[in-house]
Structure formats: structure tokens, C-alpha cells
Image (cartoon, rainbow, N blue to C red):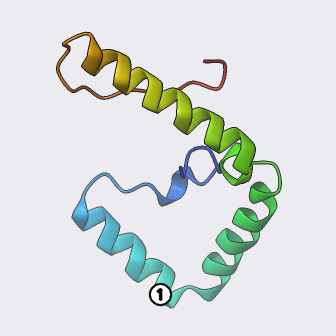
Amino acid sequence: MLTSLGMESLIAADLDAYRSLALKLAVNNEELKRLRDSLAENAKTAALFDTEISVRRLERAYQKIWETYAGGGEPQSIRIKADD
């Protein structure tokens, strides 16, 4: 989700990195405002905030899950690409 919003800087590799980032943002109001502004701007064009597109992708995910199950396959991670 963060990648689709152009907010990769908020992705933490582990719990320690997450805590460090949270503390950094808690004391840096300028950086927090910059991130909020960026999120607000990116949300205007991000597919994540387009309900119709999100629903179609979710339905494709359910279809892939069902096909795997109905075919006797084991549960697995799936990825729905924009052009799927």
C-alpha cells in the first residue's frame, strides 16, 4: 500500500526500524507535515483510493484464490497486478 502511494520512506524492514521511524516522526513536525501533504497529493491519483479499481482487483484476488482451492492447490501468496 505504501509503495502504491509513493510513500516507500515509511516502509520499515523490522520492528526496530519501525520504532525508530515512529520516534523520528513524533519529534519532527516538519517531516510529518511533508509526509501528510505528500499522502494527500498522491491519494488523488492512487488506484488504492479508487473504489472501483480496488474492488475489481479484490474480486480478481478472490477468483485466483478460489481457482487454487478448487484445483486442489495449497494456500499461497498471490499478487494482483494492475494489468491482471
Which residue is situated farthest in the top direction here? 71
Residue 37: quadrant of the picture: bottom right
Judged left or right of residue 55, residue 50 is right
Q: Is residue 22 above or below residue 5?
A: below
Q: Is residue 66 above or below residue 36?
A: above
State the image coordinates of residue 8 (x, y, percent, origin top left).
54, 50
Q: Is residue 57 above or below residue 4?
A: above
Judged left or right of residue 76, residue 41 is right
Question: Count the marks: how many?
Answer: 1
Task: Residue at 30%, 63% (x, y): give it.
Answer: 17
Residue 23: quadrant of the picture: bottom left
Helix, strand, or loop for circle 1?
helix
Which amino acid type corresponds to the residue marked 1 in the rendered image? Ala
- Which residue occupies the foreground of this view, 65 or 47? 65
Judged left or right of residue 8, residue 44 is right
Task: Residue at 71%, 43% (x, y): give it.
Answer: 47
Circle 1 Cα neighbour tier, 10 Å, few/some/many (<14 / 14–19 / ≥20) = few
Q: Which residue is mark 1?
A: 26
Q: Is residue 21 above or below residue 26?
A: above
State the image coordinates of residue 56 (x, y, percent, origin top left).
64, 34
State the image coordinates of residue 84 (x, y, percent, origin top left).
60, 18
State the image coordinates of residue 33 (x, y, percent, origin top left).
69, 80
Judged left or right of residue 34, residue 74 is left
Task: Residue at 19%, 12% (x, y): give it.
Answer: 72
